[in-house]
Image (tube, helix red, strand yellow):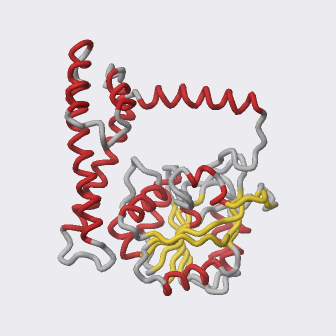
Amino acid sequence: MISVAMAVYNGEKYISEQLQSILNQTVLPDELVICNDSSTDSSLSLLEMFKNKASFKVKIINHELNKGYAAAFNTALCAVSGDLVFICDQDDYWFSDKIESVVNAFKENPHFQFISHNATCTDSNLKSLEKTLFDYDVIRKLEYGSAIHGCVTCIKKEFLDYALPIPYSYTFDRWFALLAQFLNLKLLIDKPLQYYRRHEKAVTFDTIGKKQTFFNKIARKIIKNYKSINKARSMQNFDFQRSKATYLVDFIEKIRSAPVLPSWCDEHLLNIMAENAYQKSIAFQNRAEAIKHTGIDRLKAVLSAYKKGHYKPFKGIQTALDDLFRNTKGS
């Protein structure tokens, strides 16, 4: 059974094209589960119209209050029932063979639980920008094609059940990709199977396809670095990053507490993942103790933690400096 999970918020401008592209698939889904995140435009009526004409089951879940795209996807993903779950944005456009190609890839590679495919980047009118998603550095930073974009992914339900609910510390797509990467369960398809539309109202809008002057690039980099340092040295960021380690430990414990280890889970890789997660969790505990101090006492505590290796799971000296100057006021 094939499911598609979609999150919608004020998507009236592009959603009809996206829905039609799903309807045009050579292999149709068995269900489309949509979470409407309290849209204030005509999105809901467009969804209802599509539900009446679709040849497959369409389930619409409405949030009374706007909760954000991550929560909307969490709602949709928790409601799917298919063995294969495609994640779908409201403003892209699927090529007609997308579902068929991914299904065939899973059949040929049954061990994998997570598939990410390439996409052709376009402007708001679906005009190609002559680049694919895998071409851009936003993807290469996490290894070639390491997909943090949910709209080009499909996940097996048996894996998804362990990964849900999505931790608030992660974007939903980054969370799934991270787990699949750890356990070697991710397969990449270099072939573009959809258009990836970029426009200023997109939740994940970035600089793809935008021309920048040399001075704009320098200014953006300076501002970005300044904001990055301030963010890294806040207690909010410390707690945020610490929660990520906690969620990884929780995921590992969920698998280990199962009556039988899932067939897709390599115990050796799980143990490596566990060791890394537990070391990081212990390191966070020691860092938390160090930053409780102030002045020279904090310097001594941070240096002691550094000597004991508690900064190795992070960025070493850079993270130690962040802790040394971390602002704990009001925390």
Nearest the camera: 216 or 170?
216
Q: Is residue 139 left or right of residue 317?
A: right
**Residue ID at (78%, 57%):** 129
From this view, report whether residue 183 is shown above or below residue 240. below
From this view, report whether residue 231 is shown above or below residue 210. above
Q: Is residue 4 left or right of residue 119?
A: left
Tell me which corner region of the image, top left, top right, bottom left or bottom right, holds residue 133.
bottom right
Q: Say which quadrant the C terminus sits in.
A: top left
Percent position of residue 202, x then y: 66, 51
Residue 143 in view of the camera: yes
Q: How many marks?
A: 0
Nearest the camera: 326 or 32?
326
From this view, report whether residue 94 is shown above or below residue 305. below
**Residue ID at (20%, 34%):** 308
Percent position of residue 143, x then y: 52, 56
Residue 53 in view of the camera: no
**Residue ID at (39%, 30%):** 318
Nearest the camera: 45 or 208?
208
Percent position of residue 306, x then y: 25, 31
Percent position of residue 212, x then y: 76, 37
The residue positioned farthest toward the top in the image shown: 295
**Residue ID at (25%, 68%):** 268
Tell me which corner region of the image, top left, top right, bottom left or bottom right, holds residue 267.
bottom left
